[in-house]
Amino acid sequence: AQKVTQAQTEISVVEKEDVTLDCVYETRDTTYYLFWYKQPPSGELVFLIRRNSFDEQNEISGRYSWNFQKSTSSFNFTITASQVVDSAVYFCALSEDAGNNRKLIWGLGTSLAVNP
Amino acid sequence: DAGVTQSPTHLIKTRGQQVTLRCSPKSGHDTVSWYQQALGQGPQFIFQYYEEEERQRGNFPDRFSGHQFPNYSSELNVNALWLGDSALYLCASSLHRLWHEKLFFGSGTQLSVL
């Protein structure tokens, strides 16, 4: 069965600290997609990144970086030099490539508070 | 280019009532998915509409129903509301042929059932 686990419920850091958000997933499929979304207080989910199961390259986008490791079924997200504007709830999600199965399975989210 | 729009933004209902939530997808998108997000939880998939038909459904009772119109907009209907239906309801749009690409979300409708 599909499952996404975000073990960290809440994280609080001081501005400029680096922070890593963990995501562990379970799937039986060999082809799948992993996502990270950010949900600020406004409620709208904002897409951050998508990674397919065949691409294990790490990715960096500005202060954001992602570490995908199939061996440990993890897709961790690191924010370097955090800023107050990074405060939000971050969700990891999984989608399998199984016929008409097009739904996303979401973790419970990690609430990040970046304090000045 | 308008993104995904949802209405209303907030709604208060009492137990047993019925509610209709509305969603207009991002321009050019043909697929609408609905998610329920309870406080402190991740979104839970309700169902997805494409070509005016429900294509996939999550683990929600028949009290939850939907509709998609020829212009791709969609409605979510919930009958016989109960307290546990209180949540943020999110609409997401996408292109059916690019289902594995990112979803675009609206800001949601916050439903409170008293």
Image: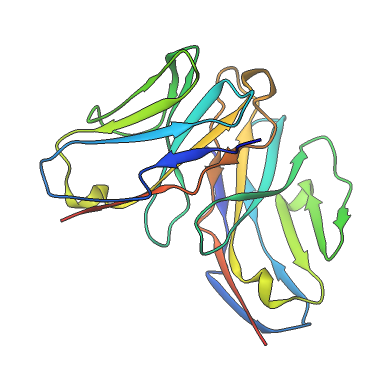
Q: Residue at x 38, y 49 (%)?
A: B9
> Could you say where residue B58 lies in the image, as x and y percent from the top left?
40, 31
Q: Residue at x 24, y 27 (%)?
A: B62
Nearest the viewer among B81 and B106 is B106
Q: Is residue B25 visible?
A: yes
Position of the C terminus of chain B, as image quadrant, is: bottom left
* Count of numbered tags: 0
Q: Quadrant of residue B64?
A: top left
Q: Is residue A28 visible?
A: no
From the viewer's perspective, tell me whether residue A57 is left or right of residue B12.
right
Q: Residue at x 57, y 62 (%)?
A: A40
> Could you say where residue A50 lies in the image, as x and y percent from the top left?
74, 42
From the viewer's perspective, tell me whether residue B60 is left or right of residue A94.
left
User: Is A56 rendered above or below residue A72?
Assistant: above
Position of the N terminus of chain B, as image quadrant, is: top right
> Could you say where residue B110 lies in the image, as x and y percent from the top left?
35, 52
Q: Residue furthest left?
A: B16
> Could you say where residue A115 lies in the image, as x and y percent from the top left?
64, 85
Nearest the viewer among B25 and B57 is B25
User: Is B100 rendered above or below residue B81?
Assistant: above
* Colour logic: rainbow
